[in-house]
Structure formats: structure tokens, C-alpha cells
Image (cartoon, rainbow, N blue to C red):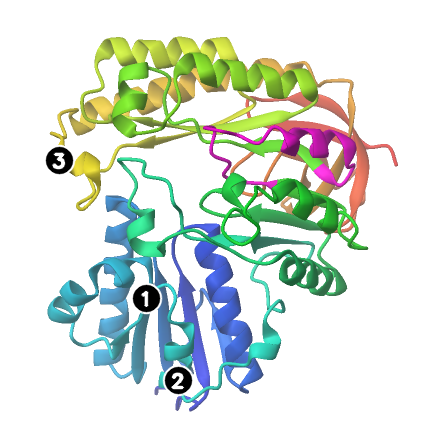
Amino acid sequence: MKTQPKNNKVSVITLGCSKNLVDSENLITQLQANDYDVEHDNHSDDSNVLIINTCGFIERAKQESVDTILEGIALKKEGHIEKLYVTGCLSERYREDLEKEMPEVDAYFGTMELPGLLNKLKADYKHELIGERWTATPQHYAYMKISEGCNRTCSFCAIPLMRGKHISRPIEALVKEAKNLARNGVKEIMLIAQELTYYGLDIYKERALPKLLRELCKVEGIEWIRLHYAYPSKFPIEIIEVMKEEEKVCNYLDIPLQHAADPVLKSMRRHITKAEQIELINKIKSINPNIAIRTTMLVGFPGETEDDFNVLCDYIRQMKFDRLGVFMYSHEEDTSAHQLEDDVPAEVKAERSNKLMEIQQEISFEKNVAKIGNTYRVLFDRKEGEYFIGRTEYDSPEVDNEVMVHANDNFVRIGDYAQVEIINSEAYDLYGKVIS
């Protein structure tokens, strides 16, 4: 017998990136302030409203979003929910198509329509909550979105179609949010945006990320500040100087480079050459030799030849990035690259992706072996089986390496820091013992 649904119980499902997660966190915060009972990424039988926050970035993400909406429609038809709402990037980009193909959804909302979604639920948008939010992450870390949208014109990217032009959030608002997060136990904040280095140009008429970092470093309780998604062209090198000077700013930079072959970089509209990338990375390392650099590469872009790919492989071997992610090109309508022929077969894209990760696995193993005998400050995220699992300042949650200490021989509290000596290593994991 089905449980009678509550009139104010909402389930929110989040798909896609950390920026989408922050949007869901803000939505849940507003709903809770309106006395709604809300659950995240888990639908129970006593919820009568389901909200799906979708991703529309690449084909695989779009398919996952569509599949999740179809699952929601089935729940509605079976009487398990009364209302189904869809928000986020997919509905921003394809609202008319979705309304036509899946009319069972009660309403679709775009990426910037939180007040409209709340109004549909008869909830007030509470402006006083700006800077305060419930977090879906473990209590000790949180993502903080410093801007929305992107002014870049990369030919493969559909994000500007879904998120619009770059809009920076004021420094004062971000410092207030960081203080609120710290008050709730957050020790590490990860600054996210479509493009971090553009921060401030719209509202301060200058690149203001260095100033923002210095202000955030003053927030009591925040111990690590991590930088994600910095565009390499016209990179403001002052960021690295602040990183070296400010102890709280992690020696970590996520700087997606996307490729190394100049013809591909030009076709991607990246406004940078291989030689300029190498010059930039070497300059960054000369200022801060302790930095860990994470990058992502895109394989299978239209026109990418075997020679282009070999250039990329040699580049990865040469640069020895600390962390590497690889994406396979997705042919997205309304991007300028969509005018090109998607001429690299899917199986070749997969082979190239696997080859790059094989090269990176060897590099990561070599770097991890060199860490044996060294001691690092580790922030512990969780316990799994017989191990406490944490990260160094050189690693971001879910995407980077982890440090494991055996629970039988060590005791730590989740969310605490500890000094850990590395005693063994694998390609992507370090094993250690707590020394203090």
C-alpha cells in the first residue's frame, strides 16, 4: 500500500557538474526556508514533488537527463508523485523540444529561473538568504560559484548557450557566503566558474580574482581555498603569486588546455598555441615550484589527425601534468564546431582517450612513487571498509588522487586534518600512516 504523500515533501535530483550542484543547494535552501521538507538525490515514496536539475553539456549528459526525466514521468503516471518539474541546462537549451516531446512534465525552467520555480511551488524567494545555503557535500568542504556564464567563444562548447554571458558576483557577497559556510563547519572551499580568470572584468573593470583570494583568506575557519577552471589565454599570473604568498590558497590549479596541436587549437578557437601553453606552464612552475596542475584534454575534435593526436601524446609525456582528465568530442548543435564534419569515428575517439589515460597512469604512478617517505597534510573525507580516505592540498574531491590510512592502525575524524607519512603508492592512490 502506497504511503500517502505529504503536501510539502520535495525530492531534488541533480545531474551534471559542481556548478549545477550549487544551483540545487540554493534551491533546497530556499525551499527549506519556506518550510518544505526536501531530500536530495533520493526519491522516497512520501515525496509528492520531484524536481530534476538537468545537464545539457554533451550528448552522454543530455541522454542521462532525458532518461531521468522519463523515469520521473513514469513515477507520475504510477501515482508516486503528483508534480514533476525540470530545471537546469537541458531545459534552458531545449525547452520547446522538451515541452513538445514530454508534455507530462508540469513545467520547465531555465538556469536562471529559480524565482519562477519557487513561485510555481508557492514558495517565496527570500533575498536575505543570498550567501547562505544548505550543502550536499560533506560538511567540511563546499563549492562556491564566483560567477555565472562565459564570454569565451570556444567552438566546441555549448555552455554560453545555456548559461549566458559572464556575470561576476561581488567580492562582498562571496566573503559573506564564505563566512556562513565556515560557521557551518566548512574548512575547504572550491572556487568554481565557467572561467575563473575572467572574474571581476564586468563589475570592477579588471581581473579581480587575486583580490578576491586575499579577502577570502581572511575568513576565519576556512583553511583551504582551491581553484577550478582557469582559462589559459591571457592568464593573470598574479594568481600564482597570491597562491605562493597565501598559505590558505592550495598549491593547485585546474587549467583546461584541451589540446596541444596548433591546427586543432586554432579550430577550437582557444586563442593560444602549444608554444604559448608551454611558456605559461613553465612560468607558473618557476613562480611556484610546489604547484600541482590539473588539466583536461579533448580528443576526436573534427579534423584531428593521427599526427595531431601524436603531438598531444608527446605533449602529455613532456609536460607530466599532475592530474589529467580526458573528454571525447561531442558534436553539439548551435556551436561553431557543429558546422564542421564530425569525422573522427567513435571507436577512434575511445581509443585515443584510453591511450592518453594510459600515458597519464604511468606519469601518475611515477609521481606517486616519489612521494613515498614524504609527509603531507591530509583532509579526511570519509571511511570506506578498512580505510579512512582523505586528500592532500594537491587533490580535489572525486576527480583526483586519494590518501588511504588503515583504520586498524590509525584513528582520524572525518573532516579533520592530519599529518600523514606516505608508506606505499599505486597509480592514483597513496597509502600512509598518521604521525600527528
238 falls in the magenta region: yes
Image: magenta residue range:
227-249
Q: Which image quadrant: the N terminus?
A: bottom left
Q: Earlier in the sequence, mark 3 or mark 2?
A: 2
Q: Which image quadrant: the C terminus?
A: top right
Give percent across and percent down for residue 170: 60, 58
Q: Amino acid at mark 2?
A: Asn
Residue visible at 45% across and 83% down in the picture: 9
Location of residue 65 by image quarter: bottom left
Residue with the mark numbered 1: 110
Which disc number belongs to residue 295?
none
Q: How many residues crowd mark 1 within 10 Å: few (<14), some (14–19), many (20+)?
A: many
Location of residue 224 by image quarter: top right
Residue with the mark numbered 3: 339
Q: Amino acid at mark 3?
A: Gln
Q: Secondary structure at mark 2?
A: helix
What is the spatial separation of the Cα atoms under label 1 and label 3, in whole angstroms? Answer: 26 Å
Q: Is residue 415 above or below residue 276?
A: below
Q: How many residues crowd mark 2 within 10 Å: few (<14), some (14–19), many (20+)?
A: few
Residue 125 versus residue 412: which sits nearer the camera? 125
Residue with the mark numbered 2: 119
Residue 75 versus residue 352: which sits nearer the camera? 352
Residue 392 in sight here: no
Q: Amino acid at mark 1?
A: Gly
Q: Earlier in the sequence, mark 1 or mark 2?
A: 1
